[in-house]
Amino acid sequence: MPRYSPTVVDHFTNPRNAGELDDPDVRAFIGNPVCGDQIMLTARVTDGTVAEIRFRAHGCAASLATASVVTEAALGATLGEIEAWDDERVEALLGGLAPDQRHVAALGRQVAHRLVTNHREGVDDDAPLICA
Amino acid sequence: MELAAMLGCPDVAFRQPESEWEASVTAAMRGAFAEHAEHNAFYRAQCEAAGVGAEDIDTLADLVKIPLLPVRMFKQPDAHVLMTAPLTEVELEIRSTGTGGVPSVARRDVKTVSRVMTAIFTQYREFFQVGKGAGLFLCPSTAETPEMGMVKAFNVLNGLLDDHAYIVRDYAFDPEEALGQLDKWEESMTRHIIGPPFLVGRLLRYLELEDIALKLDPESLVVTLGGWKRYTGESIGREEFNAKIEKYLGIPADRVRDMYGMIESNMLAVECEHHRKHVPPWSYISIRDVENTDVELAPGKTGVIALMDALSTGYPAFILSEDVGEVDHTPCPCGRTGQTVSFRRRLQGAELGCCAVSIEKFIDSQEIVAECEIPAAAAPVEG
C-alpha cells in the first residue's frame, strides 16, 4: 500500500470546504497538544442537518485530509448520522491509513462528535480540546 | 566539489580552500534553485516576480538573489503549495510545535530523507568521531515522538552507539533514573549525554542539589540541540552550563557540543572543539538586514538568519527564519573552512518555537498536574 491513499493525496492537495463560517451555529475544536494536530469545524445546522460546514486544520497531511473528508461527509448528513461515526468509518472515508497515521481517524471522529455535542448543548469551543 | 562528493567525503568537504568552498556552495545552490524554480509553480511565481533564474546565479554573491520563503509559511494550512514533490513522494513529515501551539510541518520526500540522513550521520562522524559507547538521551524516544525533528536528529546519533536509554517517557523526566543508567554503564562503555540544554540543565540542577559530582569517561561527550531559551523566557547561560558540566559530570568544555538547526531546513550546524558551529558546505547562511530582508549583511554583522539548503528536493528550502544571529567566515582553529553561525535570539515578536520548548512546556504541565493531584484516600489502619 502506498504511504498515502489516493483520497488523502486528493484532499490534501485540493482541500474541500477550507475556511471558517462567519457567525456559525456551532464551532468544534479538537487538538493534540503534543504533536499539534488541530481541526476546527464551523457549521450551520438546519432541521438537524448540516447545511454548511468549513474547516481549519494544522498538522500532518493525513490530518489536513481528514478535516477535508469529514466536512465533505458531514455536509447534508443529519447530526444523528454523524454521531454514529466511529474511527473505522473515518478511516474508510480516507481510503485507509498507514499505522502511524491512524491517530487522525480518532481526531476526525472526535471533532465530528464534538460538533454534534456542542450543537445539542449550545456551546462553542474557542480553544482546542485535547483529543485522546 | 559536487554535492554527492561532499556528502561522501566530509573530511575533504569541510576543509576546502575558500575559493573551492565558494564554488561548491554556489553550484549546489544553483542546482537546487533550478530544480525548484522549474518544478514548483508557487515558487516559480516568486522567482518570476523577482526576475531571477538559475542563469543569474554565478558566484556566492549571487545567492542573495534566490527568493526566500518566510518560515511561518510552514505553519499555514495551505502549506501544500510549498511542495515541489508530490505527496506520494513524501516519506517523513517532521514537525515542531512552539509556544503558539500551531505546528510547523516540513514534508521531506524520499530523496531528501536519504540525503539528510547521510548528511547528519556524516557530520556526527566528522565532528564527534564517535562510533561506540552508550548514549543517555535526555529526550523522548522516536517511538513516542516519531515526527519531532530534534528527536529524529538525535536518533541518528543513536545509530553510532552500542547502547542507549531514552530517559523522558510520557513527558516525565526522572534524574534518578538517569543516574542509575549512567551507573549501569560505568566501567563497560564510554557514556555520552545527549539532549536539549534545558534537560541537561535539569540533570545538572539535581546533581547540584544532591551534591553529587560524577566523573564520566575521558571520551564522553555532551551533545545538545534545541535552543538556550526556556519557554518561560529564561535563558540558559552557556559558560555557566559548561562550567557545571565540568564540575558535576567531569566532562571538559571542549567535549560539550551544541548544534543549531531548524526543522524546516535540513541544515545542522555542529560545534567543533572551539565551540564554533560549522555550516555544512551543502548549505549556506545569509544574514539579512532586520529592516529589509532583501539586503544581505556582511559576515560579523547581526541580522535575520536565512538558511539555504541544497539537500531538499521536496520543497524549496531557501528559508527566511525568525532567528537572529551572525556568520563568521574567518578561519577556524580546527582547520575547517566555510561559514560558522552564531544564534543570538529570536526575532522580536516571534514565538518561541522549537521541539525542546514543546517538550519542556509539556513536562512542566505534567509536573504541575502531578503536584496538584489529590492523594488517594489513606488505607484504614488495622488494629
Image (spheres, coloured by chain):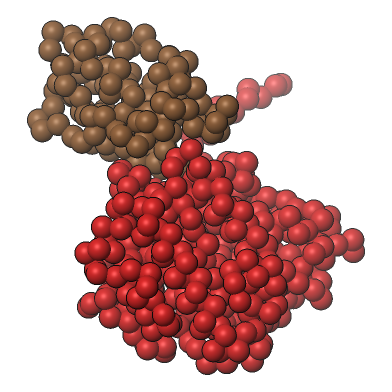
- In the image, residue B194 sits, relative to residue A31, either above or below, namely below
Say left or right for B347 vs B152.
left
Quadrant that contains the N terminus of chain B:
bottom right
Say how many tags the image has.
Answer: 0
Please state the horizontal and vertical placement of residue B240, each as a whole percent of the image: 56, 79
Please state the horizontal and vertical placement of residue B26, each as a whole percent of the image: 47, 77
Figure quadrant of residue B51: bottom left
Say left or right for B245 vs B264.
right
Quadrant that contains the C terminus of chain B:
top right
Say left or right for B158 vs B235.
right
Please state the horizontal and vertical placement of residue B72, each as a whole percent of the image: 32, 57
Please give the name of the residue rendered at 37% of the width and 31% of the height, measured from the top-left corner. Answer: A10
Say left or right for A45 vs B219.
left
Please identify the residue farthest to the left as the structure is shown.
A23
Please give the name of the residue rendered at 58% of the width and 69% of the height, measured from the top-left corner. Answer: B3
Figure quadrant of residue B193: bottom right
Please give the name of the residue rendered at 47% of the width and 67% of the height, measured from the top-left corner. Answer: B31
- The one nearer the camera, A128 or B201, is A128
Please state the horizontal and vertical placement of residue A91, each as a whole percent of the image: 46, 20
- The one nearer the camera, A49 or B170, is A49
Colour for chain B in the figure: red
Please identify the residue farthest to the front as the structure is shown.
B55
- The one nearer the camera, B25 or B224, is B25
Figure quadrant of residue B213: bottom right
Q: Which chain is brown?
A: A
Please give the name of the residue rendered at 30% of the width and 44% of the height, measured from the top-left corner. Answer: B78
